[in-house]
Image (spheres, helix red, strand yellow):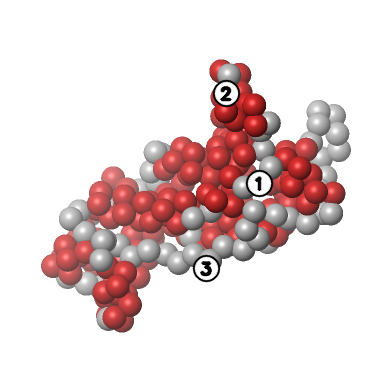
Amino acid sequence: MTATLEHITTCDCETGAASAASQDPRIARTQLALREAFVSLLEEKGFEGITVGELCARANINRGTFYNHFRDKETMLHTYEDEILADLNRFQKAITGVGLRELVRFRIAKRPLPFLVELFDYLREQGSFLHAVLGPKGDASFGPKLRDAVCSKLIMSVLNEHYQNNPTPFVNYYVAFYASAYLGVITRWIETGMQESSEEMARIAMRLLFINPGEAITL
């Protein structure tokens, strides 16, 4: 497993926008203002309650500028969600390279897996958007996408090779059970203000795999 990943940066809003934003600071400022406006309105009013006019007023831009970046608010939401899912795909090599033996080795040494630390670092960077989109006024379809992008793959990676290659219905339920539980861990961390450090969350994520019924629930 690669110990570190290349630095993950947030993609810009539309195809080709990243290079344009890097060349023109005004575009970068506009995109940042739009994203911040969208997140704040999503928290306040929910997606259905947001209008393009409100987005423009909050971001202090005109409607023409908005339509230079997005076709509509639905495109805006899906663009931001797809950016995060694309960034999370960069963790896939590290996730699939993890095995149970390596998890046990790090657990015994009481050290968090480096890629898990980086994963929680990234989730923290995206915390304001994730808080809004995973919240009660956000997009109910995004949680399962986040679960499948990270949690399901992590659980599959620590299964015995036999079950990875030939999963039975019960194995699939096992993966679904733990993947949903891990999404719950991530969601709770975000909902409660991400007070624990990325290192502590990585240790928590590892420890949860090794708790037996009746055992003391401690790190």
Alpha-carbon distance for marks 1 and 3?
20 Å
Residue 87: % across, % down: 45, 56
Whether residue 9 is situated above or below residue 135 in the rendered picture = below
Q: Which residue is mark 2?
A: 166
Question: Which one is in front in this view, the residue at disc 2 or the one at disc 3?
Answer: 2
Question: Which residue is drawn at the image coordinates 73% and 55% (left, top)?
Answer: 112
Total numbered badges shown on the rendered structure: 3
Picture disc at residue 26: none
Mark 1 = which residue? 98
In the image, what residue type sits under mark 2? Asn
Q: Position of residue 67 (x, y in %)?
A: 16, 62
Whichever of callouts 2 and 3 sits on the residue coming sooner in the sequence is: 3
**Which residue is pictured at 80% across the width and 49% down the height?**
105
Q: CA distance from mark 2 to mark 3?
A: 35 Å
Q: Quadrant of the N terminus?
A: bottom right
In the foreground, 136 or 178: 178
Circle 3 sits on which residue? Answer: 7
Q: Are marks 1 and 3 in contact (CB under 8 Å)?
A: no
Q: Quadrant of residue 184?
A: top right
Disc 1 from disc 2: Cα separation: 19 Å
Identify which amino acid the numbered label 3 is placed on: His
Relative side of 165 to 138, left or right = right
